[in-house]
Image: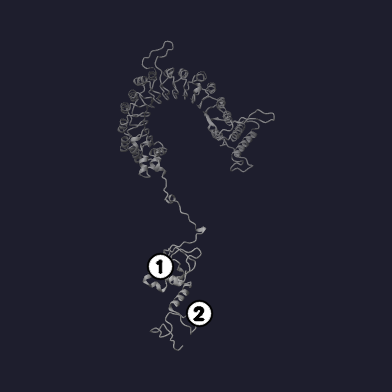
Amino acid sequence: MADIETYSPLASGPPSSGTPDGVFTDNEVDGNPTQGQPKRGGRQRLLRGLQRISSSPTLVQLGRPRASSSPYRLPSSLSCVSLASSSASPFSQPSATGSYFSQASTADYYSSAPTSIPGSPISESPEHDGIESVLAVRKVEHAITPSSTTIALPADLKRKKTLFNLWASMPHEIRIHVLSFLQPKELVRASRANKEFYNMCFDGQLWERFDASEFYQEIPADSLAKIISAAGPFVKDLNLRGCLQVEHYRRAEVVVDACKNLINATLEGCRNLHRTTVHSLLKSNAKLVNLNLTGLTAVGNSTCKIIAQSCPQLETLNVSWCKHMDARGIKTVVEGCPKLKDVRAREIKGFDNLEVAQAIFKTNNLVRLTLAGCEDLNDNALRMMMHGLNPEIDILTDRPIVPPRKLRHLDLSRCSRLTTHSVQALGHLLPDLEGLQLTGVTGLTDAALEPILASTPRLTHLELEDLADLTNTLLSEHLAKAPCAPNLEHLSISYCESLGDTGMLPVMRKCTRLRSVFMDNTRISDLVLAEAATMVRERAGLGAGRPSTPAIGLSLVVYDCQNVTWTGVREVLSRNAEVKRPRRATANGRVNGAPTFPTEIIALKCFYGWQMTVDEHTKRVLRGEFSAASRLERKWADYMQANEEAGIAGAHGRRRRRRAREAQQAHADEEEGGITAGVVPGRRRARTAACTVM
């Protein structure tokens, strides 16, 4: 022991004797340091040391960390000696009976695989550079388990899916058809999306009709001018009714310059248009068919002259309330437009001119003639329009021999200078007449209407309002027996104070297609209401089973009629909600058949004190609530009866008033769920003078 010198790291040189540095004896390796045994070779001792180091769990800490892309993950450390295989390559496939890396002798490993493991002393040799990168990318086949099984997708499914653009794939015609369902206001909003939508939204097919009457109060003047300038060449139907925005001459000029293909033009209410602007519009639109210039101050006789020269296709002209023109302008248009069929000239002066009347007689193409409020129209002018100048007279009938007129609608309302003599001339010359309005012609008598009713089988609308000289004979003997009685739909005899039940009862029986009758301020009574209810009931019939909703078949206006009482009103309400039950019984005592419900009812306008109850009853019937409507009618009748009895003086007056209060209380409880709002049960309600809403 004395001959052996211990090595110290602080010594200046290597030890002088003993074992070499870093080499252990066999006894030290085995854990039994024994002296006197022969020492083994350095090669065997080196392999022994490597085996001991390889079995240590800290092998992975000796070298640099494994790459993150390593293809294998083993649960335990890998021995550097176990990398050897029976094949020449260190990366050969494992055998069927062995592990992933087959076990071989150390000598075979070094003889066949001159590689090194990171962290070993031989890894520093240049001849082993690059082995770490080879091990890092090595592909190791693991045993496939069901949980890690993967199936490759087909090539067509691996392609990136693209969205199908339905709008872009549509043909242009279909897209335009879809946009045609939008209103002009919605089209303008959609045009702001992008350039493509802008071009489509202002396509000519979408702007053949431009109607600003629904949004004229909301659209600014500049926006209106821009829209018309963009779509103007395609617009055929232009409606600027009420557009006061088109007042500046520049904006108006934009409209005129853009619109060149108009067929229908409505400028009603554009009061600030200049005359030159209107004239330019008329000159640039030779295809005009319908023209409405109602209330324009810029319209004069010169405007009518331009219409006659520039618009040969014109069929309808409305110049009502144009104060700066007269009947001579109408004459110019009638003579210059051979296709003119409709002339509306309310409150136009100068119709006493016989030349104008002669021009209207010669054309004989007019289907509608509206001269309401033309106070200058007199008997001579009207007879000239119907008979012409010096017609030939038939000696048998004493009637002029002239071609019949083609008029279907004639409005002579408020022409106060007309008398029976001129209106009588309409008889036997208007076989196609459907509507006649003579409201306010106060000088007419029965003789004026008798020949007209006898020769107009197609008459459906007749207005005879405020004709005080008419009698019941005209209604009962002429109108009820006229050929137009089965076709009559509208009748107005308001303020005819001489007419009553005698004339209206036959009319209600014969005119079974009536839809509206105005009889306010006349002498009719409850009998007419009952007859009207019966007529409607028989005309409509009874629907088997419960209908969805009844319809209003007749509108009656009977307010301010002194002979109409609540009894007649109740009759109408009762018939409206009447549900008939079958009366036939079988041998078992059961009734066969379903109940029948009304399909048409009467809408009644009566005394304002009863109107709220009548309206509520009508609403219930229209909703199909016949039981509720009948209950309301009975409660109202009880209230009205008790109210009348309470007004009778004499004995038992207090008891009658108490019954009226009880009926009113019961009615209010029925409508408000059994307890009157704001009234404590058991106390009497305060007396009211009028009927409340029921």
Identify the element where label 1 is drawn. Answer: helix
Crowding near the residue tagged with mark 1, few <14, some 14–19, many ≥20 C-alpha atoms within 10 Å: some
361, 549: nearer the viewer:
549
**Picture quarter containing residue 202?**
top left
Identify the element where label 2 is drawn. Answer: loop
Res. 283 visible in picture: yes
* Residue at the spot of label 1: 132
111, 633: nearer the viewer:
111
Crowding near the residue tagged with mark 2, few <14, some 14–19, many ≥20 C-alpha atoms within 10 Å: few
Residue 31: numbered disc: 2
Tell me where residue 138 appears, x and y as whole percent.
42, 63
Residue 489: numbered disc: none
Q: Amino acid at mark 1?
A: Glu
Task: Name the image colouring.
Answer: one colour
Q: Amino acid at mark 2?
A: Gly
Question: CA–CA distance between discs 2 and 1?
Answer: 34 Å
Residue depicted at 42% across the width and 43% down the height: 166
Q: Is residue 573 above or below residue 161?
A: above
Quadrant (top left, top right, bottom left, bottom right) of the C terminus: top right
Left or right of 528? Residue 302 is left
